[in-house]
Image (cartoon, rainbow, N blue to C red):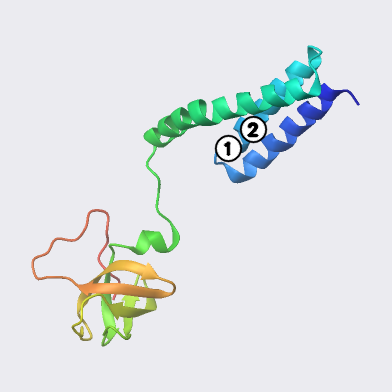
Amino acid sequence: MADWLWWISGALVLGILEMLSLDLVLVMFAGGALAGGLAAGLGASVPVQIVVACVTAALLLFTLRPWLLRHLRGRQPLVETNTAALVGREAVVMSTVTVEGGRVKLAGEVWSARAEAGTAIGPGTPVRVARIEGATAVVAAVGAGQPPLPGTAAPAH
């Protein structure tokens, strides 16, 4: 099999793998492989092909990728999902929450919780999720008159 076909095959595999990862790294390596294939097609030796592929991939990775990421992310903000989407939301204490533990109702589900500060928070008190640690919501009491964070909904009771 001709050298250029190996390079093109490698670029194809990297392109397919990029569709699974979507982080724009493997496609830059695929571009390097295409450049190596072009060098092979022009009759360059294997060491020259490897250098061409590596230099091209590095240039694409450090110049084109940051530009693409900046423009792709500028079009649409990243949407937080999973537990990251719960940070900042309000919940209601179901059983007293202390630094050791407790329960809150968050997004319609009962979660184990810990108080962020050293004070106990009684049942029925609205709290705000400061962070999620594993399967535990670390919460702080919502101060009287403290406005809810933008984009957060009132908890379901």
Residue 48 horizontal/vertical position (percent): 74, 20
Quarter holding the N terminus is top right
Q: Is residue 148 above or below residue 114?
A: above
Q: Pick the quarter of the image with the C terminus.
A: bottom left
**Mark 1 highlights which residue?**
25
Question: Residue 77 at x, y = what percent?
Answer: 37, 42
Residue 87: percent from left, percent from top: 32, 63
Question: Closer to the camera, 70 or 144?
Answer: 70
Count of numbered circles on the image: 2
User: Residue placed at 45% from the left, 34% from the top?
Assistant: 69
Cβ–Cβ below 8 Å for labels 1 and 2?
A: yes
Q: Residues within 10 Å of mark 1 (few under 14, many from 20)?
A: some
Residue 141 shown left or right of residue 71 in the figure? left
Q: Residue at x 76, y 33 (%)?
A: 10
Disc number placed over residue 29 in the picture, else none: 2
Q: Say which amino acid is labelled 1.
A: Val
Q: Report the amino acid beneath label 2.
A: Phe
Q: Give the Cα distance between marks 1 and 2.
A: 7 Å
Vertical arrangement, residue 153 with respect to residue 122, above or below: above
Q: Residue at x 58, y 29 (%)?
A: 58
Residue closest to the eye, 35 or 128:
35
Residue 84, position in %: x, y? 39, 60
Disc 1 element? loop
* Secondary structure found at label 2: helix
Tell me the quarter of the picture where residue 73 sits.
top left
Q: Residue lying furthest front in this view?
A: 47
From this viewpoint, which residue is outermost toward the right? 1
Q: Residues within 10 Å of mark 2 (few under 14, many from 20)?
A: many
